[in-house]
Structures are given as C-alpha cells and as structure tokens.
Amino acid sequence: MEALAWICLFAPLAGVVTLTLAGSRISRGAAAWAGTLFAFVAFAAAVGELIAMLGEDASQRAHTFTAYTWAGSGSFHVPLGILVDPLSMTEMLVVAGVGAVIVMYSIGYMHGDVKERRFFVYLDLFVFSMLLLVMADNFVLLLAGWGLVGLSSYLLIGFWHERPEPVAAAKKAFVMNAIGDVGIAIAIFFMVRDLGTTDFGAVFSAAPHHWAKGSADANWVAAGLLLGALAKSAQIPLHTWLPDAMEGPTPVSALIHAATMVTAGVYLVARAHPLFQNAPDILALTALLGMATLLMAGVIALVQTDIKRIIAYSTMSQIGYMFTAVGIGAYSAGMFHLVTHAFFKALLFLGAGIVIHALGGEQDVRRMGGLGAALPKTKRLMWIGTVALIGFWPLSKDAILASDLEKGGTTATIVWVGGLLGAFLTGIYATRLMRLTFYGERSRYADEHLHTDHGEAPWVMMLPVVLLAIGTLLSGFLAIGFGVNQTFGDWLASAAPTIEPSTADDLVTTAIAWAVGGSGGLLVWRAYTQPGMLERLKRPFGRTPVIAEHKFYWDELYDSIAYIPAAAIATGVYRFIERWVIWGTVDLVAFVVRMVARGTADAQTGVVRQYATVFVAGAAVLGVYFLSKATL
Amino acid sequence: MHIGVEWFISVSAILFGIGLYGVFTRRSPLILLLSVEIMLNACNLALISFSRYLGEQSGQVFALVVMAVAASEVVVGLGLVVAIARRKGDLDVDRLTGLRH
C-alpha cells in the first residue's frame, strides 16, 4: 500500500503549506481545525496501512518505497525512500495517532492566542518531521527528520518568545540536540567510508563483515548513534534541556516532550540494533546510563514544585527504563513501554494542562490542592495515567524488568535492582503529584483564581484526554506477559527482537514492582495526611533534598566545564590577539599608507600638461629601454 | 613604384610628433583633444602599415577598435569641455587645476 504510506508522511506537510499560504485569509478557528484535520488524515492513512500489513504474511511485512534519488555522488546514493515495517508502523501509529489527538486538544488550549495559526503550522511541521524520522529507510534521511524535529521542538518551546525564559529554554534544547546530531553524523561518516551506503538493510547486513564485533570502529559507530539518542531522549549526560523545555505550551510538552520526539532515541537504538549488538560495551553503557537517568530523574521529581516539571522528570525517568530495555537487548520491550508511555504520559500532561488552564496559567503545585471537587473528571482521568505510570497496568515497565532478570549477568542484574528502586520512586512522585493537586485543603490562590464556570474544560480538550485514557487501558492488552499474551513482541520480532522472560521471572518481578510502587504511593499518601510525618521522613536524608532541588548541579557543571572556559578563552583572545595583533596590523597598514601618501601627494598639481609630460617621459624611457634590447 | 613600409612609419611618426607638439604647446582643451586624435590616428596608421607588411589581419582589427574607442573618448571629452565652459566660461587647461592635492 504505497500510496497510503506517502499520504501518511506528507499529509501534515500539506497542512503546513496550506496553513502558511492561507495566512490570515482564514479565521483562527478554521486554521486550528484544518491543522487537526491534516493530522487525522495522516492517522487514517497509518491505520489503513496497518490493516494492509496485518493481511500480509509475517515474513513479508517490510516494504521499501523510493520516490527518487535525493542526493548522489559517484556510487554513493541517498534515496528519498521510506521503510514501512512493523517497527516504523508502530511509530507511525503512535506519532500520527497521539499527535492528532493532541493537535485537537490544542484547539481548546490555544484558543484566543494571537499566534494561534502559527502554532498549528508548527505542530503539523513537527508531525511531518517525526514521521520522516520514523519512516526513513536510510540514516541520512533519518538524520534529516532528526534535525527537523529538533527545529520544530525549538520553535514550539520558544513559542511564547515575549518572555525570556522560553527563548533561553529553546536555545538550550537546540544546542544540546545539535551535539547529538553531530554524533549521528559521525556514525554516518563511518558508514559512508567503510560501507559506501547508509541504507538500513545494506548497512545492517554489511556492518558485521566490515567491523569486527567490539572493534574500535564498531564502537565509534554505536557511540555516535548513542550520543544522538541520549541528546534527543534527554538521558544523562545530555538531559538538562528537557525540564526547561516545559516553558513551551502544554500540548507541546505532551506531544514532543513526552509522547513522541523524546522517545526517538529508543526508536533509533531499536532500529539500529544490529550496529549496537556489534558493540556490546556501548550497549551495556546504554543500559547503565538509562538506569542512572531513571534513578536521578526519579529523585529530582520528588522535590519539584512545578506540575509540568514533575511530569517532565517522570518522562526522563521512564525513557531511562526504555534505554535499559534496549541496552540489554530487549528491544520490543523497550518499544512496548514507548507505546504505553506515549498514551499515559500524554494523558497526564493534557490533564495537567486542564488544571493549569482552570487556574489561569498557574503551574506551582503548592498553590493548588483540593482541586478534585472542582475538576472531578480530570482527577479520575489523571488517576488512570498515574496508575499506569506507577506500573500497575499496562505491564510494560514490568516487562522490561522481567527481561533484565531473564537476561542475567552483571549489567542486567544491576539494572534490575536499579529499575525496582526507580519503581519505588515512581510510586512516590506520581502519588505526590495527585495528592498535592487534587486533595487536601484548597489553597487561597486556587480559591481566587479557579474558574470553571463553563465546566471543567471545553469538549475539544476533554475528548482527547478521554481518548488517551482509553488508549492507555487498551494498550496494556498488546502484551500482558506471564506467557499469556505476547502479541506486541511477536509483531515486532522481525524488526526488533526481544528477550522473552520466563513466567516465573515475570511473576516475581511484577509482584516486587507492584509492591514497591504501591508502597511508595501509600507512604507518600500517609506522609501528607499525618502531620509531622513528612519532616520525620525527610530528616535522615540531610541535605539530599536540597541537592535534588538544584537538579544535582548539572547546569552548574556544564557552566564550569563549557561556558566559563569558553568565555575565558574568548576574553583572552579578544584582549591579546584581537586588540594587539588584528587591530594592530590594521592600524600599521593605515599608518604606512598615510606616511607614503603625505610624501607623494604634492606631485598632484592638477595641471594636465604636467601629467602629459610625465606620461610621455615615462613612455620615452620605456621606448629607449626596449629599443636597446631589440636585436635588429 | 613600390612604397616600402618605412615610408608609412615615417608619416606615422611625423603625425605622432605633430600631435605631441599640440598637446604640449596648446592650452585650449578642444585643441588638446584634436591633438590626441592625431596621435591616435598616427598609431592607427602604424598598425595598418605593419599589418599589411606582415600579412597579418589582426592589426586592422586593432585599428578598428582604436577608432571606436577614440570616438567614445571624443564624445566624453567634448561633453566635459562643454560642461566646463558653461560652468567657468574659461577654457585654459593650465588654470583648470581643481584636481590638485
């Protein structure tokens, strides 16, 4: 079904072009609905493609469609080609599906903003870029999509550019992502040099023959790709841009910084898994960095007070789980968590968006509290997301941890323990968020600013949240584990293999994960209900909460290793090189010219015949010279 | 009777000398321009003489180019002379020293 795949890819781009050309000729509302329509067209095409694919034999599901040669040099060609296989199909459905729903939510959320039309252009541009990223059939086109999602992310984070914070956050996100782009570019250089192609299939089949397993070249390629994945997916050490990105409008946070773009790193590792399998050290590094991120982000989420930043750190932590999954080779388990996470995290973000909307833009959880009575539907829907986040259902996090146990070995065991610890932290911060927002005494601020005269939210905002809640619940049935149902793993088997945990491992891990997650939730509930308990719990940790509030000083670290030395070098170069060498040379040249001119300017008398005399005299001298040289 | 190339060159040299003399002695810019034209045509004559002597056509082409340039030069030169005459009413090149340092 070639046509459907192209429609899916280009429908959002058509939206961008249409809305840009229409400009102010159509009303803001019409632009918003048109933007939504184009996203839904992409989703419909993706669903059509899925139906076609389900009708095919499992071994015949990978299709490559090539439009034309995009770039070529000698025997090296980069086609504008798309690959539709179960892995990219999964991503297409998530991107177009969750994307379309969130674009629809934006109709309500952005209503009345002066730049409403532009917002929908950017959103459609993002959906197109993300589809290009996941549908590309070679690394160069993937990098093009990779860069374009970075651009749309930059435009949308800085959407409210009247304030300085979003502008700074947008720049930070762009620069950190550029570091990752360089990593992917380096990996591509290796491919072009040694393999002469960047086509997925050709690279994956040729790579093991050219690069020995664990060799320096194999490690460089995998490390370059990993750098890109770490930057895009906000993992240690390139993670600090994601919390700042919450300065963007909430639908942007839900779409780009929770559901789709930030999980692109997981997709990249799963897609390029033959290259990562060829570099076992880098693969182990992936898992360990993921674990470090999930624990660190979990701890920071405990002390954040901005509702969106809590969810952002939670996102970072959940992507950490996905990285641990792909890092131990359980690719489809990582992809499964990606899919379920896209639903429940978008659900939580959009729910938070309704709360923020109802409070007139307030995001501080300390100024909320007791909103459950005013926003009962939102509260119930967000509970579905919270239960999913803690890991009760869907069982995607448990599947990752069970794979760790099944895999065994040092790395996987460390990751298993770390993951369970993270599940405890997840239970705490997820419950704390609900508790502080919806329960307890309503704050004075909320009393004054809450406005729900027109109901909780307009239907265009509520319907997407309901759809995402349904998606969250249904996505759990894609894979249940315990040997009951492995549909998702089987579906991805050809493109992204997995580790199938034994039923015993599954049962043990799930039981422990439920227990620690649940106990974390209960603990925090009691801590906020019983007076004094919170302080008693905090005491043994000393200054740790303060360090966590400062996000473990990563920003300060980057300042001291990157910004401060760079600024010092620049100042030094200015003071000594620029001021003395460059300006000095210019001044010297000017001085010499001025001196010579002062001596010779008197020859300019303005008398034409004098000039003519000098001219003729010169010509005469030349004539005599040439005549004396001439041999008659 | 055959007239050798040296005769033509001699005429050319004489013409050039006349032009040069004019440039050095006269003060009117109009006469100066005329003198320059004489020198240019002396050059043309030399070019064509050598062209014929050597059986080489490019000298003729050069001469044509020189004529075109000379025509343009006269147009510009006369234009300047007229403009200066209107502005100053005085056409002595020794007194037109506005471009002095």
Image (spheres, coloured by chain):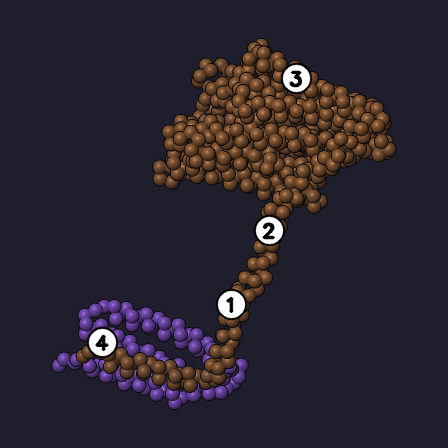
| Labels 3, 4: front one | 3
Nearest the viewer among B37 and A558 is A558
Crowding at dot 3, Cα within 10 Å, few <14 / some 14-19 / many 20+, comes out as some
Nearest the viewer among B64 and A196 is A196
| Vertical comparison of A259 with B79: above or below | above
The residue to which callout 3 is attached is A512
The local secondary structure at tag 3 comes to helix
The residue to which callout 2 is attached is A565
The local secondary structure at tag 1 comes to helix
Q: Which chain is purple?
A: B
The residue to which callout 1 is attached is A585
Quick check: do tags 2 and 1 share a chain?
A: yes
The local secondary structure at tag 2 comes to helix
The local secondary structure at tag 4 comes to helix
Image quadrant containing the C terminus of chain A: bottom left
Which chain is disc 4 placed on?
A: B
The residue to which callout 4 is attached is B49
Q: Earlier in the sequence, mark 3 or mark 1?
A: 3
Residue A418 position in % (x across, y down): 62, 25
Q: In the rendering, what colour is chain A?
A: brown
| Labels 3, 1: front one | 3
Residue under the point 77% across and 34% down: A364
